[in-house]
Every structure is written in C-alpha cells, then in structure tokens.
Image (cartoon, rainbow, N blue to C red):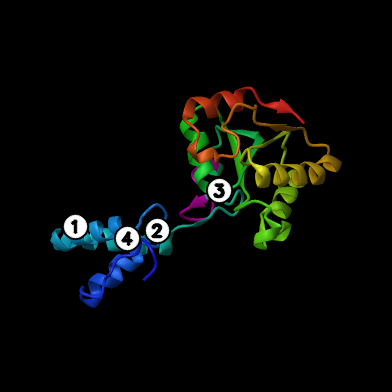
Amino acid sequence: MAPGSLDQSFVVEPVARLIEELSRLPGIGPKTASRLTFFLLRADEAQSRALAEAIVDVKAQVALCSRCFNITVGDLCPVCLDTARDQAKVCVVEEPLDVLAIERSGVYRGLYHVLHGHLAPLDGVYREHLKIEELLDRARSEPIDEVILATNPNTEGEATAFLIHRELTPLGVRMTRLARGLPTGGDLEWADADTLGSALEGRREL
Ligand SMILES: [Zn+2]
C-alpha cells in the first residue's frame, strides 16, 4: 500500500469508488475524501443528487468563449458580451481562474485572452498547445491598443510572456507586464485582490 493511502479493503465497492474519485481532486487527500464520502452517505438524497447534477452540468453546459477562451455558457463569455468594457485592452492570462482573480481585484475593465496553460517543453507543452495563434488573430483583427501580459510570475509564465512579446512586436501592439510585487514563483490565482490590483495599475511597458 502506498504511504498516505487508506486501507479501503473493508469498505463496500460504491463507497470505495467515491473515496477514490474524490481523492483525485486537487487538495483532497484520502482522509478528506473519506470524510466527504461519509458526509454524503449521511446527507439526504436531494443534497447528494444536487451535487452529482452540478458536476455533470458543469461539463455538459460549460464551453470556451469563441473569442477569448474564457469559460462560458453559449458562444461568448460575459466579459466579451459586455460592450461597456474597454475593447482596446486585452489581458492575457494562463487560466480561466486568473480571470476570476483579476475580476475580484475590481481595477480592470478591459477584455481577456486565456491561453489555457504556459510553455512547459519538459512536460510536452509547446506554443501550439496554447491559444497564441488565436491571440495573434485578435491582434490583427480587433482594435487593440494594449496587450497586458499577465502570465504567472514564475519561470514558465515569464517564458510564455517572452514568446508572446516576440510574436506580437511585429504587429506594432503596445505591451505591458504586471508590476513586480506579486509573490515570485506563485500563481496569480493565489494573489490577494489588493496585491493583484496594484500590480495591474502599476504595470510596466515592455
Ligand atoms: Zn470571452
């Protein structure tokens, strides 16, 4: 038995299966998975059914915005549909969670472009796996006057920002990068709203 795993030989199959599935989730170890499973066993039918349906629906109904690749229901995401937002600014982030983090800061009123990852050649993630070509298309066809490179302040995020900077430069787009001050090596999604807000307001020219 692997260290840290739980002996499940004494639990019946449906229970073991739920523990197994829950323990695959980020931040949930075997003990928490067991606690959640036994909570659901005691919960009433309606509560566990609501959870199961929410999980199924999130996969069935949620898609990617055809313009910025943020998560959405339908063709365009709520940010792209909001015509009051500044259509000339595009903030490039790695993940949809980063959009949430930046929105929480309350200081940004432009659009987004979600790359869905960062360059990580050692893990087999190359340029073509990210929404970079789509960003170049937008820079050519939309009236963009500033691209904010808000990839994570770590090695992969910097490498990704560097590549995008190189590819967008010939198109004559002004580019900025978040101010230093975010926890180095971390992910945007973990930065608190105030820190992220100041990093956006203090962004520097590239
Ligand atoms: Zn969108």
Label 3 sits on residue: 95
Return the disc, 1 or 4, that comes first in the chain's sequence: 4
Residue 196, image x, y percentages? 54, 29
Residue 191 on the magenta span: no
Q: Residue at x 56, y 30 (%)?
A: 109
Label 2 sits on residue: 25
Residue 77 on the magenta span: yes
Label 1 sits on residue: 39
- Mark 4 residue type: Pro
Label 4 sits on residue: 30
Q: Residue at x 71, y 47 (%)?
A: 160
Return the disc, 2 or 3, that comes first in the chain's sequence: 2
Label 1 and label 4: CA atoms lie apart by 14 Å
Q: Which one is in front, 12 or 98? A: 12
Q: Residues within 10 Å of mark 2 (few under 14, many from 20)?
A: few
- Quadrant of the rendering where the C terminus is positioned: top right
